Amino acid sequence: MTIGEFELIRQYFASIYGHRRDVKLGIGDDAAVLSTPKDQHLVVTVDTLVQGIHFDENCAPENLAHKALAVNLSDLAAMGAEPAWVTLSLTIPETDVSWLSTFSESFAKQCQHYDVQLIGGDTCRGPLSITVQAMGFTPDGCALQRSNAKPGDLIYVTGTLGDAGAGLSLLNEQRTDYTRSEKVLIERLEKPTPRLEIGILLRTLANAAIDISDGLVQDIQHIIDSSELGAVIEVKDLPLSEEMLKNYNKKQAQSLAMTAGDDYELCFTVSPENQDKLERILATASCQVTQIGRITQSKGLQLKNSEGLDKNKLSGFDHFTSEKARELNIK
Ligand code: ADP
Ligand code: MG
């Protein structure tokens, strides 16, 4: 069954969770009208997922909707912003109502969970591609930036690292059955959790932050490049999940934790004076945080205790320029 463009928008997107009082006019007109709070800055981000590049054709619509929203909310989390609104630009090859209904239900569920309202978008025909733009707020002057790390800062990460990369290698095996722990790793790839609560708590505690979308080594490089500093990472301190260690040996796991993308954990830096406060405040947060290294005055990235890791993958990391990082970013 197929339906037209306007019926599609009305049926699947116009009625998605719409209860925010700051939305004066939502989906249906030429543009949305929004009320912005006083003394807050608007924080805006956009990300696109393209079939064949970011996901393959077997990816379930439920997971796609989840991920398209989560990767954007993760960017807001890394800025310390509280999300408010999203737009959705959907390019689909055909109006497959079963696909659309699963996609929009999953999208709506996530919007509701984070109290985020879909306020507009665009729909066209073409190879499957999903663009979400997310908007949120931080109090004036509180947005977390990559460029603000200080020499001597402690480097922390949320959650565990490398799980999504492990999930990807498991998915690539294209098996019909996966164990429970393998499924957890695959879910970490397909349904990342944006660390919004932590991002907001970090506003007054952290100096710099980034979300890990391209792998720790590459993303920490963005912090040290833009802060014009260096970093030492203690490889033995990288947090690894139980599920990861069930399926990979320690060295493989550490290698994934350093290089694999798509974890959407936060990496942030905190001055030593704030360490006690940070650990006290985050003790009751929804996920663990782990100290993994320090920011240094001398430039470059040093990986300590990285013996025995895949040297092909790790070589050159000390001299990883941001230009190289950008090249590698092209997936
Ligand atoms: P226009 O042609 O004026 O840009 P459209 O016909 O593209 O408007 O869209 C009509 C309304 O539906 C607008 O409010 C637009 O923001 C919204 N819209 C279109 N596609 C989507 C979508 N995929 N998700 C949410 N809102 C959408
Ligand atoms: Mg118009």
Image (tube, rainbow, N blue to C red):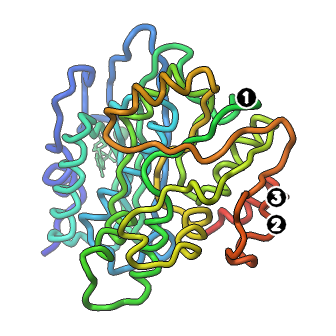
Mark 1 vs mark 2: which is more N-terminal? 1
Q: Is residue 207 left or right of residue 204?
A: right
Q: Are marks 1 and 2 in contact (CB under 8 Å)?
A: no
Q: Is residue 328 left or right of residue 123?
A: right
- The label on residue 150 is 1
User: Which residue occupies 26% across, 38% down?
Assistant: 114
Q: Amino acid at mark 2?
A: Gly
- How far from the left and from the top, in percent, is residue 133? 43, 43
Disc 3/disc 2 C-alpha distance (Å): 5 Å
Q: Is residue 42 above or below residue 263?
A: above
- Please identify the quarter of the rendering in which residue 238 is found: bottom right
Give SS at disc 1: loop
Residue highlighted by disc 2: 316
- Picture coordinates of residue 83, whole percent (x, y): 36, 32
Q: CA distance from mark 1 to mark 2?
A: 24 Å
The residue that appears at 26% across and 81% down in the rendered structure is 179
Asked if the residue at label 1 sits under 8 Å from ligand 1, the reply is no
Q: Is residue 288 left or right of residue 161?
A: left
Q: Considering the numbered disc 3 on the image, is that residue within a helix, a strand or a loop?
A: helix
Is the residue marked by circle 1 packed among few (<14), some (14-19), or many (20+) residues within 10 Å? many
Rendered image: mark on residue 318:
3
Q: Nearer the viewer, residue 38 or 223?
A: 223
Q: CA distance from mark 1 to mark 3?
A: 19 Å
Taking the spot 45% from the left edge, 14% from the top edge, the residue there is: 40
Q: Which label is found at residue 30? A: none
Answer whether labels 1 and 3 touch (C-beta < 8 Å): no
Q: Amino acid at mark 3?
A: Asp
